[in-house]
Amino acid sequence: MNKRTLEENIFKILMMISISLVVGSLIIIVALVIINGAPALSLDLLTQTSSGEFYLGAGGGGILNAIVGSLLLALPATGLACLIGIAIALYLQKDFIHSWLAGFIRFSLDILWGIPSIIYGVFCFLIMIYLGMSASVMFGIIALTLLEIPIITRYMDESIKLVPIGLKEGAYSLGSTKFETAVKVVPRQALPGILAGILLGLGRGIGDAASILFTAGFTNRIPSSIYDSTAALPTMIFQLSTSSLPVVRQKASATALVLLIIVFTISILSRTLSKRYMKHVIK
Amino acid sequence: MSTESRIQIETKNLNVSFHDHVVLQNIDIKIPAKKLTAIIGPSGCGKTTLLKSFNRLLEIQDDVKIAGQILVDGKNILRPHLDVPDIRKKMGLLSQKPYPLPMSIRDNVAYGLRIHSNKNKDEIEKTVEHCLQEVGLWNEVKGRLHDPASQLSVGQQQRLCLARAIAVEPEVVLCDEPTSALDPLAAQQIEKLLLKLKKDYTVVLVTHTLRQAKRVADYVIFLYFGMVIEQGPADIFFNNPKNPETKAYLSGEIS
Amino acid sequence: MNRRKLRDFLGTKLMLVVTVAVSLLFFSIFFLLLFKSLLIFEQHSLTEILFSSSWNPGFNQFGLYPIIVGTILVTGIALIIAVPISILSAVYIAEYAPKKVRKVIRPFIDVLAGVPSVVYGLCALLFLVPFVKDVVAPWFGIETTGYCILTASITLAIMVFPIIISLCVESFHAIPLSLREASLSVGATKWETVKKVIFRASAPSVISAVFLGFGRAFGETIAVNMVVGGITRTPSTLFSPGQTLASLIVSAYSDMMSSPLYESALMMVALILFIVVLLFNIFGIFVLRRANKRWNV
């Protein structure tokens, strides 16, 4: 074997090691959560709200409050982000706006995407304090909305950009206005990408802890109004994992298992949905 | 075919398919050494695929199946456990659009040399100059050898790619419609170069313009829907085609 | 017709308002954080804040030095681990892996990117902390609780794998096949082509991927908070506990309302975090856009 092949083979081995580390770490993560969490997973855990003892040892209820809380935070937040996102994404089309301005807005959205979620949490916390209010479902939703807007908008924008100009011309030539074309024709063509973006945003929102830690607070009850504070799955995991008791940590893993199942379902759903709606799309 | 020239490349029952779609079927051709062989045919008939099978470039794409034999100097290059880079070194490639490597003009030509030989700096410098002179680029670029190759015009880039190919002293130069992206003047320069090159190299030229094939080819292979319809010396092929499809193609009825 | 026009007009204006509001979001975040941190700047000089090593809010001491060192160490080591592994993995996926393997690995990487950070933190807690405590540290003859800089770095490294990998794979795919052919046809091996052509052609995208990965690691809060130890002392070894900027905000938020100065100090931490991540992201996105233009993607 000459020097050139030797070098190539060494790097091939390094590549195999690297990719095994990456894939291995995901397998370890999933395995850890399943092995530690599955024994603690029970119907009671899923259907009861937690009580004080829940964090101190075995028993003491379940995580229903966190499951409900997560849904109450992430679903409305995704809905709001979706409305705002679609408005921006449609507006960013060439028909409405100068391309340099569109470029600037895309740039700022990309930057917002990269901002750590803790910053959104702090930002909403400051507004909350300024308004003299306390941690609640409402501010949790606002924080998650801000977090999801850049993701959802950029996804929608990218898929709308791919809508062929001929389709728009077709709509215009039938007498549609810019607004009608933007709202009625374009989204249909871009639907797979839009759906993928929404689900990606939902996945990000439902899994984020740092932004809702101060804004949504934490409680053992299921919130009865948007002014109540609420637990959520990520914050519940965070709370439970601070305990040094193995029993409590098992509950943290079980909660993580529930969260992972939700996140993976969303991810699989996103793939299959965007594949299914692909067939309505003119290529 | 004239008996005086030896066979450089020969295929035996070559079949190629992409994603289970057959592109080349039962190809049996002979390409003479130190001649210019033109592969002609309508677009999408598998010319480029055939060309790239000669230096095993097809296999870097997904889902390619290659069966049969390709003999280069009598040895099958499809046999396993072969030093593929070594085969490719023997076969220079000039692609449809020029693709200069993302480095300086000089480094583009020196790229292959540095990989293959232990030449010192001066020798490399000399070879670079020689190759650039061969392709008529030296006078145009000698003052700016360290500029990025992408700053050259498209025609110059294509000649640079040719210089890069011949720097590693190949036996064959494979050309995949090398003039299709160029303006007429630059195209003419390349054509002239190809005619000059065939003294020292076996040149295989894929082209979809019949006129170009008539101007430069010694030997012609006509592909149609992935099959070889007719092959033979250029004068016989153009003046006295045997196959009705060849006649139709030459008269412009199919394109 | 008039109703149609009115609806068009209102709809378009509404879209404009929403767009402007969101574009202004990061200015509002910046100015709000800046405004909130003014108080601390009135009482302490910037050099004192950045270079004093005593963080003791109860005694009116707000030296961020140990936390800044902790942040740089945690993020830096995370990248030192993540960058080579991610780039090599990306090369494998884009250039070497057979199609079947590629089809399985790409979704795998996407899934890894979707795992919530708190789950990474939990797994680090369950596995890495004891691993570092019982296996890694004894190798070096050091005693540690496992809650330390190194554990946080490894956790972060795993979190940024998917970011760097998918951006690199994308940029490798954007390089035209013909450029590879050009290199291979002069007899270069695949690795030589990767090393001398692919890396060079995609250098800007790879650099920007590293920058975006840095931004993610620098701002990661929850997972780091769970394993870094949370001690505001300048770490002496990689096995010492430490604290990072983002993680400090979470650790301190429950008592930050105790004094306006403390609150202001934490807002300044958030401001630093915001500015650093912003700069790195701006640079990363800027380089990436220039890179994409080169291949007309």
Image (cartoon, rainbow, N blue to C red):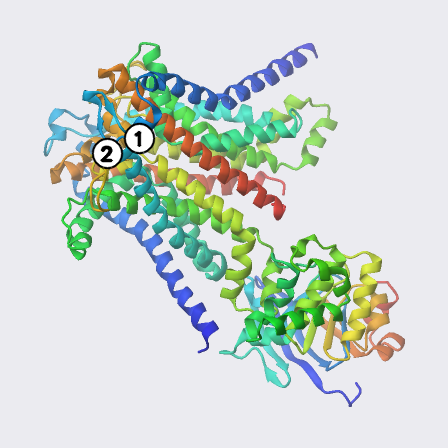
* Residue depicted at x 65% and y 24%: A96
Looking at the image, tell me whether mark 1 or mark 2 is earlier in sequence order: 1
Marks 1 and 2, how far apart at CA: 9 Å
For the C terminus of chain C, the quadrant is top right
Q: Is residue C111 left or right of residue A31?
A: right
x, y percentage for residue A252? 20, 36
x, y percentage for residue B152? 72, 55
Judging depth in this view, the residue of B68 and C155 nearest the camera is C155
Q: Amino acid at mark 1?
A: Ala
In this view, B26 is above or below A49: below
* Picture quadrant of residue A180: top right
**Residue under numbered circle 2:** A237
For the question of whether residue B184 can be seen, the reply is: yes
Crowd around label 1: few <14 · some 14–19 · many ≥20 (10 Å): many
Q: How many numbered marks are there?
A: 2
Look at the numbered discs 1 and 2 and tell me whether their residues touch, using CB distance below 8 Å.
Answer: yes
Look at the numbered disc 1 and give the secondary structure of its residue. loop
* Residue depicted at x 74% and y 65%: B138
x, y percentage for residue C266? 30, 23
In this view, A9 is above or below A133: below
Look at the numbered disc 2 and give the secondary structure of its residue. helix
* Picture quadrant of residue B163: bottom right
Q: Is residue A185 left or right of residue A274?
A: right
* Residue depicted at x 59% and y 76%: B87
Q: Amino acid at mark 2?
A: Ile
Judging depth in this view, the residue of C48 and A239 nearest the camera is C48
For the question of whether residue B24 can be seen, the reply is: no
**Residue under numbered circle 1:** A209
Residue furthest to the bottom in view is B3
Q: Is residue A56 left or right of residue A159?
A: left
For the N terminus of chain C, the quadrant is top right
Q: Tag 1, which chain?
A: A
